[in-house]
Amino acid sequence: MATPHLTRRAFLAGTGLTVVAPRGLLAPHSAWAAAKVGAPAPAFTAGATTGKGVSLADYRGRIVVLEWTNHDCPYVRKHYDTGNMQTLQKDATEQGVTWLTIISSSPGTQGHVSPSQADELTVKRNASPSAVLLDPTGVVGRMYGATNTPHMYVVDPAGMLVYAGAIDDRPTTRRADVPGAQNYVRTALQSVAAGQPVKTPVTRAYGCTVKYS
């Protein structure tokens, strides 16, 4: 069945929750134009919960995962309540991957947290990112065209963006859908580690819209 075309207005309208079918490759929308798969990942520096600035350039030579998140989003909760995101983080970081969790919710919006609240969430959920970065002005999120939570990106050791899109192919909030899902991020990481091209480099992210100012 053909996937219906969604305009940007329709994509962002309504309740703030966006669900689109991610099966198969979908042509990148203009919202993703800032960061292009197959091109160098946009350079950035953002403040971590530790108070220190973290730059993507610091991790040149390593695989990097960027995870846009909003802890109150039901789609994000699906992956954290089942332990799916934490398992992926742990497996990746144990293989030397740098995992940067990024929060672009603006002050006063859903998902906005202070550094201490972000750290409390990491401990409470038994998460294991390399760092949690705060992007309350949305500069980094807009640079990457992050539209949803979760929205996932993989950068290879040469600094090239090799994957952008959904975490998996089940655009629902149902926890029961996690075990049978095709995890695009895990597959992309395996391909990069093996020195192979990512077979599905672009998918359409699903979830809650990023709460930009």
Image (spheres, rainbow, N blue to C red):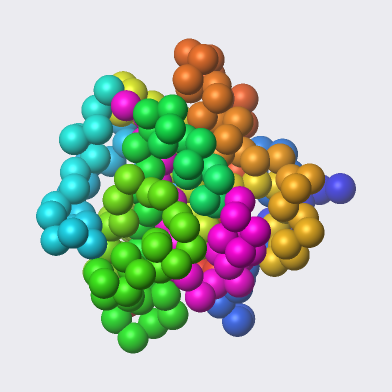
Quarter of the figure with the C terminus: bottom left
Q: Residue at x 58, y 35 (%)?
A: 186
x and y percent of residue 5 in the render? 69, 56
Q: Viewer-proximal residue, 13 or 149?
A: 149
Q: Viewer-proximal residue, 36 or 170?
A: 170
Residue 139 occupies quadrant: bottom left
Residue 6 occupies quadrant: bottom right
**Whether residue 57 is situated above or below residue 7 in the rendered picture:** above
Give yes or no for residue 69 being in the magenta stretch: yes
Q: On the rendered structure, is 78 left or right of 160?
A: right
x and y percent of residue 158 in the render? 31, 22
Q: Residue at x 70, y 66 (%)?
A: 173
Range drawn in magenta: 62-84
x and y percent of residue 164 in the render? 49, 42
Residue farthest to the top, as pictured: 195
- How many marks the image carries: the answer is 0
Q: On the rendered structure, is 88 left or right of 20?
A: left
Residue farthest to the right, as pictured: 1
x and y percent of residue 170 in the render? 73, 53
Q: Residue at x 70, y 58 (%)?
A: 171
Q: Viewer-proximal residue, 8 or 213?
A: 213
Q: On the rendered structure, is 107 left or right of 35?
A: left
- Tell me if residue 104 can be seen: no
Residue farthest to the bottom, as pictured: 108
- Tell me if residue 76 can be seen: yes
Give yes or no for residue 86 being in the magenta stretch: no
Q: Residue at x 37, y 53 (%)?
A: 101
